[in-house]
Image (cartoon, grey):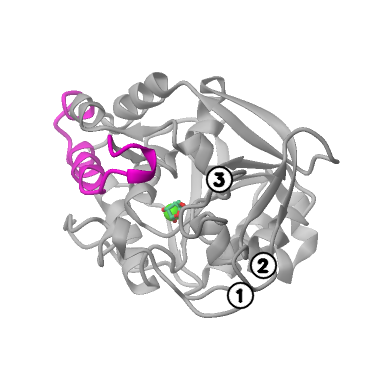
Amino acid sequence: MPRPVIIDCDPGTDDAVALLLAFASPELDVRAVTVAGGNVGLARTLANALALTRLAGVSVPVHAGADRPLLGAFTGEPRVHGPDGLGGIVLPPGGAPAPGIAADAIRAILRQSADPVTLVGIGPATNLALALATEPALAERVAAIALMSGAWAEGNVTPAAEFNAWSDPEALAILLAAGRPVTFATLELTAQALATPERIAQWRAKGTGRCLAAACDIQASVPPSQRLGGRGAPLHDPCAVLCLTHPRLFTSRPAHVQVELAAGISRGRTVMNRWGGVPNARVLDTLDADGFFAVLGERLATLP
Ligand code: RIB
Ligand code: CA
């Protein structure tokens, strides 16, 4: 039976590829897409999620959520994703968002689902945290939480912190305290998923559908990461989806994860003890990158 999932996102170029991948994954039953402000403001991330859902031709409800973190003000990351969030790639407009805000929709799905639901977080975790913090009893309806978040070494938005964790560290702390299995795709993992021009060209050769073309164009718009040698951009968010559908492409280990909430230069840092402590999460270690890109291209090519 397909795994019921809710995907909470901030599209975002890599979110776009992750959403299309999820829509093309028969192992997943995407019950809803919920959207937060993150890479760019909520108005844009919502429009992008709606456009991607329509592009894929799927009838998945898209709910607007938080336009700012639990504490503090919204900040974005237009340097990577462009001011529109999709690297300047213009998609046909999507439909209207589903009624109800993200946190309420997440709680309603958890409450009504016959089976526990997996929460996939690929943006600031504000919506997921609001859902669980306002109705803690629903945590038992959560099968697992898969996050693109954090790093055990250097961050990408500050030297200490990865963008999603840094954007709303209190929200991440709430997820860690929920008592459900949490898996992290950290920056060290996603650095192994380097989308080079060659790999994008291999995708393009797999089909002629509009979704495959859009994924290639969107990913090709992302500036190569100088942090990773300038050969390509790490494809962060699809890792949090593929670890659910193709776990054999990954290795992982238990870890004790905490997030720094104090103001200052380390705020949002995920302190990951991968060698000791009482584990409260799993951290993905390695990725079969060739297998990852092959599956991604094949899956994207199945979409319209
Ligand atoms: O640090 C990378 C993460 O932050 C990705 O999810 C990207 O989309 C941004 O949200
Ligand atoms: Ca994201």
> Mark 2 belongs to which amino acid?
Glu
Determine which residue is flagged by label 3. 5
Sequence-first tag of 3 and 2: 3
SS category of the residue bearing label 2: helix
On whether residue 206 falls in the magenta region, the answer is: yes
> Mark 1 belongs to which amino acid?
Leu
SS category of the residue bearing label 1: loop
Quadrant housing residue 127 = bottom right
> Mark 3 belongs to which amino acid?
Val
Magenta highlight range: 203-231
Q: Which mark is residue 170?
A: 2
Residue 249 position in % (x across, y down): 51, 22
Structural distance between the alpha carbons of marks 1 and 3:
23 Å
- Judge from the rendering whether residue 82 lies leftward or rightward of residue 194; answer left or right: left
Q: For the residue with label 3, is its CB less than 8 Å from the closest atom of ligand 2?
A: no
SS category of the residue bearing label 3: strand
Crowdedness of circle 1 by 10 Å Cα count: few (<14), some, many (20+)?
some
Vertical comparison of 16 with 29: above or below: below
Crowdedness of circle 2 by 10 Å Cα count: few (<14), some, many (20+)?
many
